[in-house]
Image (cartoon, helix red, strand yellow):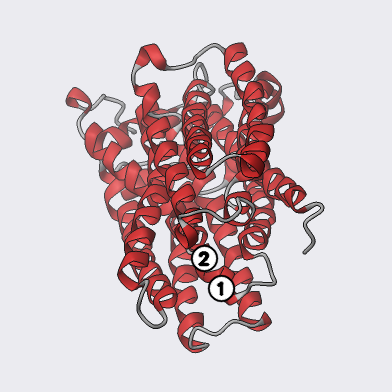
Amino acid sequence: MVNLEPPTRLEGKYAAIVVCFLLGNGCLFSWNSMLTIEDYYMYLFPKYHPSRVLTLVYQPFAVGTLAILSYNEAKVNTRLRNLFGYTLFFITTLLVLVINLATSGKGGIGTFIGICAISGGFGVADAHVQGGMVGDLSYMQPEFVQSFLGGLAASGALTSGLRLITKAAFDNSKDGLRKGAILFFAISTFFEFLCVLLYAFVFPKIPIVKYYRSIAASEGCKTVSADLAAGGIQTIPQGEEDLAQKQERKGNKQLFLENIDYLLDMFLIYALTLSIFPGFLSEDTGAHSLGTWYALVLIAMYNVWDLIGRYIPLLGFLKLESRKLITVVILCRFLLVPAFYFTAKYGDQGWMIMLTSFLGLSNGYLTVCVMTSAPKGYKGPEQNALGNLLVLFLLGGIFAGVTLDWLWLIGKGW
């Protein structure tokens, strides 16, 4: 029998919040490291638009993989899915180091193709981890989803901070850009390995996590069996499992129709954000007094304010919960497109930094408002499925955004 007794005083809640934050950080730490050293890749591959191409390569793998996983979500072993994702992050991050060392930091089309292949690997890993974790956490407490999303943003803020430090440390040294990049990916490789250990041995044994997974199992969720076993909980006997499976569960199509506004909200948030960040900010903001620091400062400000935005909804009176109002705010956010265009053309760097900060703040805030509001009112298996759908539309929005980002190059040549 599965023990459905709630843990005393929600035992392990804060430990779960911390681990969710670290796992969220690990989900995008490697990818954000690659984005944050765009100045190094721009130096190595000046003719290949790496800030745009690497993101464009990443997205088809992420969206395609997650579409397959979301369609088969009810049959996928969540534990194996997430462990595979974090392990792939570890291996691909290590490969970035190997390629750099093997080529002695030289550019060329061969090296660029290798980096693009690794970018595709990041996309596959992201689809496994981000969809799997958000789906898994959606039937637990909203604070867990919020903490995981906060970790996603923190990975950007942390990598930006590290990049500014490494640039300052190595700016005047020979091969300074390369040394900073190597240090970056050495840290990323270690952290991804840490996330594998956290998910494999720590997270499934936290009492409150075991409790919510037990509830989900009793409601017919088959994806949690391996995680329950890892946490030392016996799975449901066959007779009770058959009874649980007979409980009515809404399919993906019905969940899609009931939550189409939330799903489109996620798509639109990230379509706008990625049409500006990082490609436009890396290449199209002109020359300013900050020189080579300018793009790094913009990316850092975006990441820091994205992180801050994800914690604003913790103040209940500042959280948007009206479905219609959330959609209206997201549509109004598209006014940032002309704002960025005219600021890049006529404004100074102060205005651009302010706009970029607002882009990050609104992105983080609206993401958490949608992600924590949408799964309410459903059973565990349905919340898991809806979490996967939300991340699928999020990644679809990113794919659309990085494609639209190329429109900024119209009239500028290649």
Q: Residue at x 63, y 76 (%)?
A: 112
Image quadrant where one finds the C terminus: bottom right
Q: Residues within 10 Å of mark 2 (few under 14, many from 20)?
A: many
Is residue 164 among what the camera can see?
Answer: yes
| Image-based side of 108 in relation to 241, left or right | right
Residue type highlighted by circle 2: Asp
Q: Secondary structure at mark 1?
A: helix
Gap in Å between the C-alphas at discs 1 and 2?
6 Å
Q: Residue at x 67, y 31 (%)?
A: 252
Where residue 369 appears, as percent x and y from the top left, is 49, 24
Q: Quadrant of residue 46?
A: bottom right
Residue type highlighted by circle 1: Tyr
Q: Residue at x 68, y 47 (%)?
A: 399
Where residue 168 appears, as percent x and y from the top left, is 33, 65
Please name whichever residue, 358 or 19, is drawn nearer the observer in this view of the structure: 358
Q: Secondary structure at mark 2?
A: helix
In the rendered image, the vertical position of residue 352 relative to residue 112, given as above or below: above
Kindly identify which residue carries mark 2: 39
Q: State if disc 2 and disc 1 touch (CB < 8 Å).
A: yes
Please name whichever residue, 79 or 297, is drawn nearer the observer in this view of the structure: 297
Where residue 177 appears, as percent x and y from the top left, is 43, 73
Kindly identify which residue carries mark 1: 43
